[in-house]
Image (cartoon, rainbow, N blue to C red):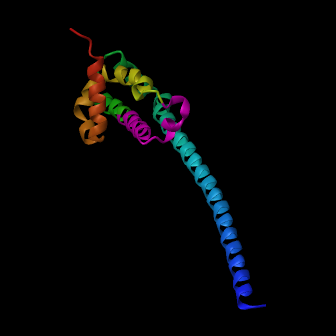
Amino acid sequence: MNWDAIGAVGELIGAIAVIATLFYLAVQIRQNSRAVERTNEFANANSIHETNAFYSQVFAMLAQDAELADIYDRALRHESLNSIETVRFTSFMNSYFAWLEDVYHQQTENVGFRALPEITDTSFFDVCGPYVAKLLSTPAGAGWWDRDPSHQFLPEFVALIDAFMLTQKKPE
């Protein structure tokens, strides 16, 4: 065998090695992409689970505490609350709006519920708005909103709720 033939065989072996390497890399990239997709699906499902668990925890406060449930009911009926009752109602409002802010941020970041195709086009306030308006239209809820949120929630979220509530005001 001469050196030209040996060089040709070497080039052929090198070309086969490059093709095999490219095939191996393509398989690895496909497997990695599937793994990343599954990780994202799991993270999304976990986000939804955590959101639902926190929501359940917020409303469990009412279900498990008859006195708080009475305070909540009286607040929604626009009855006045004493200072201790106001503190307890405020605790509920803080918890509910913390959950709501979390849901809002998930929606804006396109994770959690927002990532589900069947509700992608649903406005945040189509789902949460009626209850937000119900809570903040009460004297106790409005008083809480005027006092507390500016130092507890992000300014973007506070501005969003303020703008929404302005749309809920009835023309005089």
Task: Assign the C terminus to one quadrant of the image.
Answer: top left
Q: Residue furthest bottom?
A: 2
Task: Assign the N terminus to one quadrant of the image.
Answer: bottom right
Q: Residue furthest right?
A: 1
x, y percentage for residue 117? 54, 33
Q: Which segment is the magenta one?
A: 94-120
In the image, is 61 to the left or to the right of 49? Answer: left
**Residue at x-position 48% and y-position 39%:** 54
In the image, is 5 to the left or to the right of 73? Answer: right
Magenta segment main secondary structure:
helix
Q: Is residue 140 visible?
A: no
Locate residue 169: give its quadrant. Answer: top left
Frontmost residue, 169 versus 18: 18
In the image, is 83 to the left or to the right of 99? Answer: left
**Is residue 47 covered in magenta?**
no
Frontmost residue, 138 versus 84: 138
Q: Is residue 97 visible?
A: yes
Q: Residue furthest top?
A: 172
**Residue at x-position 24% and y-position 38%:** 150
x, y percentage for residue 140? 29, 24
Frontmost residue, 66 versus 16: 16
**Is residue 117 covered in magenta?**
yes
- Eyeballing the image, is 126 above or below 93? above
